[in-house]
Amino acid sequence: KTAEPYVEEILQTLRPEKITVAGYSHGGALATLCYEYIWFHHPGLHPHLRGMGFGAPRVVSCPAGCDALAARWANYTVVRNLDDIVTHLPPKFMGYRHVGRLWEIGKKGRYTSFDAHRPENYISSLMALSPDEAAQFHA
């Protein structure tokens, strides 16, 4: 909520035609909330809004009815390094879910659950993608 006035000021001042929100870890959670804010308050930007959360925790709680919101999150991707503990919190049993497309990278067991969250290990996992794997991301 504290970021909303800043997002609104940027939208009003710059009047962007296209928007991509992105963040890592806590910033990935904020990117999710920023995307939601823009979607809700600026419907004219829907076709031009994209988002990505790298290593982001789950921030949306919807034990029932998440499927009804699927179209809203069609242009949002959560990138999760396998074994990254942060991306598994808060737990699903509490109703929290990742929204949009979940793209898992890395190899299971390559890192500990804490090391998998390090930004340099996200970069390493992204750099190790084959051209075919990278192409799937753009699909």
Image (cartoon, rainbow, N blue to C red):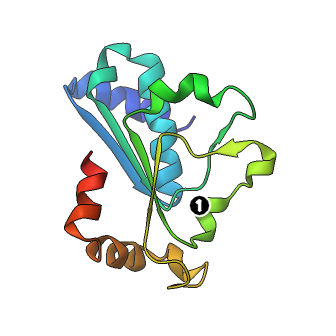
Residue at the (58%, 73%) spot, across then down: 83
Residue 3: in sight, yes or no? no
Crowding at mark 1 (Cα within 10 Å: few <14, some 14-19, many 20+): many
Which residue is disc 1 drawn over?
87
Work out which quarter of the rendered image holds the C terminus and state it.
top left
How many numbered marks does the figure carry? 1
Task: Measuring from the top left, give residue 35's x and y in whole percent.
Answer: 43, 34
Q: In this orientation, which residue lies closer to the viewer: 31 or 132?
A: 132
Amino acid type shown at disc 1 = Thr
* For residue 116, above or below residue 91: below
Classify residue 99 as left or right of residue 24: right
Residue at the (44%, 18%) spot, across then down: 41
Residue 77: in sight, yes or no? yes
The quarter of the picture where residue 91 lies is: bottom right
* For residue 113, above or below residue 4: below
Task: Measuring from the top left, give residue 119's x and y in whole percent.
Answer: 41, 73
Classify residue 5 as left or right of residue 87: left
Q: In this orientation, which residue lies closer to the viewer: 94 or 31?
A: 94
Work out which quarter of the rendered image holds the N terminus and state it.
top right
Q: Secondary structure at mark 1?
A: helix
Task: Measuring from the top left, give residue 52's x and y in whole percent.
Answer: 39, 48
